[in-house]
């Protein structure tokens, strides 16, 4: 399925965005940074067939005392790292919990203190037996390690009621694959998973071999600028995560998606490098000045 086209809002009121979390899982490879991406099922209601980073909705259980107690730090400390003062500290901590939980459920990677490969595999087997995430951590005596992931950005789905049925307020995190662990894919939620160099993923998208949504495109283009995972994590620590609220525009027959920093976007300060607008044509996004504009 193609990504939803940007267009002026329809008459129906837009749905409120639902909190979600995504983790850009990274590793160093011979030719630079690689990110782990999952290919979603063709019949998924959101981003069918698309390549995505692990992640999903923030569930009520993510804010439970039982799960948040498994972090080595209190909710106010996680709240400060997310840099969203308007958000309740427990809700902010739940976003971290959702990122770790969803990544574990979808890839088997466990961001917990001293979690080596055998322990992660044991925990994943317990998940398949139907034990919930908080229960697995309690039974294995594990603590989640929030220091392993860094807030990267926040993407809010634009209100386009006529085209987008579900909106999300998604916090993107970056993290290094823990030493000794391997990323897998859960056949219930995806049909495949692979490590991709960010530029190679964008080249595959440009050649129409894979499907990507706009937040994944712009995140890959950003991460492609760094030589190794250390540099990505250092960038994340250097600044608060930018808030990106894309603005859809229709100019004649041309559909556009504008980002902060574009002359026609209400936020004049740039949120990220690269183009400040993308065209949407034939179900595909592209910069006005072509492929290389993603890396300017």
Image: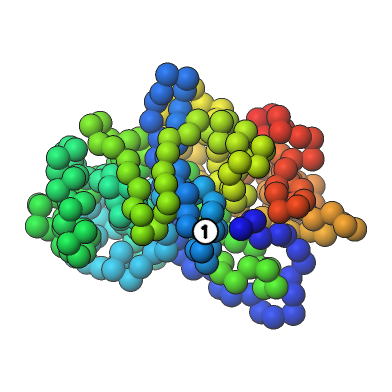
Q: Measured along the vertical axis of the image, is residue 285 above or below residue 21?
A: above
Q: Seen in the image, is 188 located left or right of residue 46?
A: left
Looking at the rendered structure, the secondary structure element under dot 1 is loop
Q: Is residue 173 visible?
A: no
x%, y% of residue 76?
32, 56
x%, y% of residue 33?
45, 28
**Residue at the image point whose x is 35% and y is 48% from the top:** 185
**Residue at the image point whose x is 19% and y is 44% from the top:** 120
- The image shows a total of numbered marks equal to 1
Q: Is residue 216 visible?
A: yes
Q: Quadrant of the N terminus?
A: bottom right
Q: Measured along the vertical axis of the image, is residue 23 above or below residue 97?
A: above
Residue furthest to the top: 30
Q: Seen in the image, is 31 located left or right of residue 107?
A: right
**Residue at the image point whose x is 21% and y is 51% from the top:** 124
x%, y% of residue 164?
63, 68
Q: Seen in the image, is 273 located left or right of residue 175?
A: right
Mark 1 = which residue? 42
**Residue at the image point whose x is 28% and y is 44% from the top:** 109
x%, y% of residue 119?
14, 43
State the image quarter where residue 210 is shown.
top right
Q: Seen in the image, is 45 located left or right of residue 285?
A: left
């Amino acid at each position: 399925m193609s990504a939803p086209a940007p267009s002026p809002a329809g008459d129906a009121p837009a749905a409120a965005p639902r909190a979600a979390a995504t983790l850009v899982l990274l590793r160093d490879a011979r030719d630079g940074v690689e990110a782990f991406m999952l290919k979603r099922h063709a019949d998924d209601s959101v981003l069918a067939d698309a390549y995505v980073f692990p992640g999903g909705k923030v569930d009520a259980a993510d804010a439970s005392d039982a799960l948040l107690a498994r972090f080595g730090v209190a909710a106010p400390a996680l709240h400060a790292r997310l840099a969203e003062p308007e958000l309740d500290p427990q809700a902010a901590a739940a976003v971290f919990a959702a990122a770790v939980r969803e990544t574990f459920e979808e890839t088997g990677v466990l961001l917990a203190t001293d979690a080596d490969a055998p322990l992660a595999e044991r925990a994943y087997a317990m998940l398949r037996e139907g034990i919930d995430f908080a229960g697995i951590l309690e039974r294995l005596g594990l603590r989640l390690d929030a220091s392993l992931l860094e807030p990267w950005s926040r993407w809010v789905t634009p209100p386009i009621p006529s085209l987008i049925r579900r909106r999300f307020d998604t916090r993107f995190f970056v993290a290094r694959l823990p030493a000794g662990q391997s990323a897998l894919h859960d056949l219930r939620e995806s049909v495949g998973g692979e490590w991709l160099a960010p530029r190679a993923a964008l080249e595959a998208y440009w050649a129409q071999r894979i499907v990507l949504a706009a937040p994944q495109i712009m995140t890959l283009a950003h991460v492609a600028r760094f030589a190794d995972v250390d540099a990505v994590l250092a960038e994340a620590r250097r600044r608060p995560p930018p808030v990106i609220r894309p603005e859809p525009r229709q100019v004649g027959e041309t559909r556009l998606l504008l980002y902060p920093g574009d002359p026609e976007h209400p936020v004049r300060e740039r949120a990220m490098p690269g183009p400040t607008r993308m065209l949407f044509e034939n179900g595909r996004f592209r910069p006005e000045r072509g492929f290389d504009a993603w890396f300017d």
